[in-house]
Amino acid sequence: MPTRQRIAVLIGLLISAFFLWIAFRNLNPLSIVDELRNINLLWTLVTLVVFFGSVYAIAWRWQFLVNAIKPVPFAPLNGLVWVGYMGNNVYPFRTGEALRAYLLQRNHDVPFVKGMTTIVVERLLDGLVLVTLMLGSLLLTDIVSDDVRRLLQVAAPLFALMTVAFFVLATVPRILRRLGRIVSAILPGKLGEIAGRITADISEGLGGLRSPWQLAGTVFASYLTWLLQGLTYWAMAFAFNIEATLPLMLLVVGAANLAGLIPASPGQIGVFEFFASAVLIASGVNEALALTYALTLHVLVWLPMVIAGFIVLVRQGLGWRAVTQAHQIDVQTAEAPADAPSHT
C-alpha cells in the first residue's frame, strides 16, 4: 500500500477511535453487559431477516441501473452486492465498490467504468433519499440534536447539488461528450484515448437515469431500501424494549449512514455508534441502552454480510487477495481497451 494510502488509513482509524472515545467515555462496560442480558432473541432474528430484505432491495435497485446498459439476472447481482458490502466493511477506500464493478465486468461483460457509474448513482440516490427521510422524520418527531442538524447542513446541499449535476449529464449527454472531446484533445496520445473512452462509458452508465421506467424503478427501490433499513432498526429497538416510532428510527438510520461522509475506518466503527446513539439519547433513551443498541445493531448488520460476501467471493474463484488489490483491479480494468476480453 502506498505511503499516502497508509496515512489515509491511519487518519481513518484515528477518527474512528476518537468517536468511540466520545461515545463510550462516560460508560461503565458492565452496563453494556447488563443491557445485553435483556435482549429479545426473537426480535433480533427479525432484525436480521428484515436487514437481508433491504439488501435484496439494493440489488433490485442496482438491476434497474445495470439493465439500462445490459440485462443481467437478479441473483448474480445480489451476490455482487454482498461482495460489495463485505469489501467496504473490512478494507478502506470503499474497496467493495471496485470489486463489485470488476466482477460485473468479469462475469457479465459490463465495462468497468459503466458499472462504477451505476454504483456512484446509487450512492448519490442513497444520500438524497436519506436526507429527505430525515427531513420528513424531523417534522414528525420532536427530536432536537445539534449533531443531526450539523450533519444535515453538510449532507443536504452536497447530495442535492451532485444529484442535479448527474441528472443534467444524463439527460443532456452532449455536455458530457463535449467535455470528453475537450479532455481528449488536451491529453496526449493514449491518455486522450483513455479519457475519451471513459467519458463515453460514464455517459452510457448514466442510461438508467434517462429511461422513465428505469428511473422510476430506481427511485422506488431506493426508498424501499431505506424504509426496510428503518424497519430493521425499529425491530432492533423492540429487541431492546426501546419505545420508538418508525420516524424516529428513520432519523437514526439517516444519521448513522450519512455519517459515512466522515472518512473513518472501514465499517464506520465508532462513527456509527456515536450518531445512532446520539439520536436515541436526544429522544430520551438512557445513554447505556442507546449505546448498547447501536453497538449490537452495528455488529448484526456488519458480521453476517462480511461472512456472506466472502463466501460469494470464494465461489467466484477469488479470495482475500482480491479485496486487498481491488484498487489495482480498478486501474487496470478502467484502462483496458473497450474490446479487450473482460474475463480472467
Image (tube, rainbow, N blue to C red):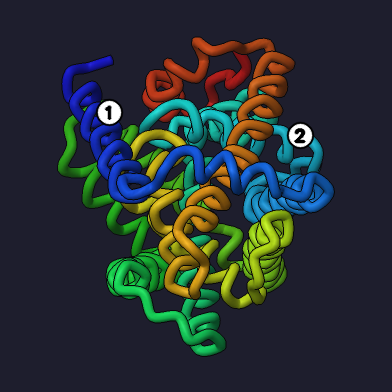
Q: Nearer the viewer, mark 2 or mark 1?
A: 1
Secondary structure state at the residue bearing disc 1: helix
Expressed as whole percent of the image width and height from the top left, the position of residue 335 reads 38, 26
Residue appearing at x 54%, y 26% in the figure: 339
Question: What is the three-letter code of the residue carrying label 2?
Answer: Pro
Quarter in which the N terminus is drawn: top left
Which residue does the numbered mark 1 point to in the structure image? 9
257 sits to left or right of 238: left
Looking at the image, can residue 331 be seen?
yes
Expressed as whole percent of the image width and height from the top left, the position of residue 79 reads 72, 33
Residue sitting nearer the eye, 176 or 239: 239
195 sits to left or right of 44: left
Which residue does the numbered mark 2 point to in the structure image? 76
Residue appearing at x 62%, y 23% in the figure: 106
Q: Is residue 270 above or below residue 222?
A: above
324 sits to left or right of 70: left
- Give the quarter of the image for residue 306: top right
Task: Point out which mark residue 192 bears.
Answer: none
CA gap between label 2 and label 1 equals 31 Å
Question: What is the three-letter code of the residue carrying label 1?
Answer: Val
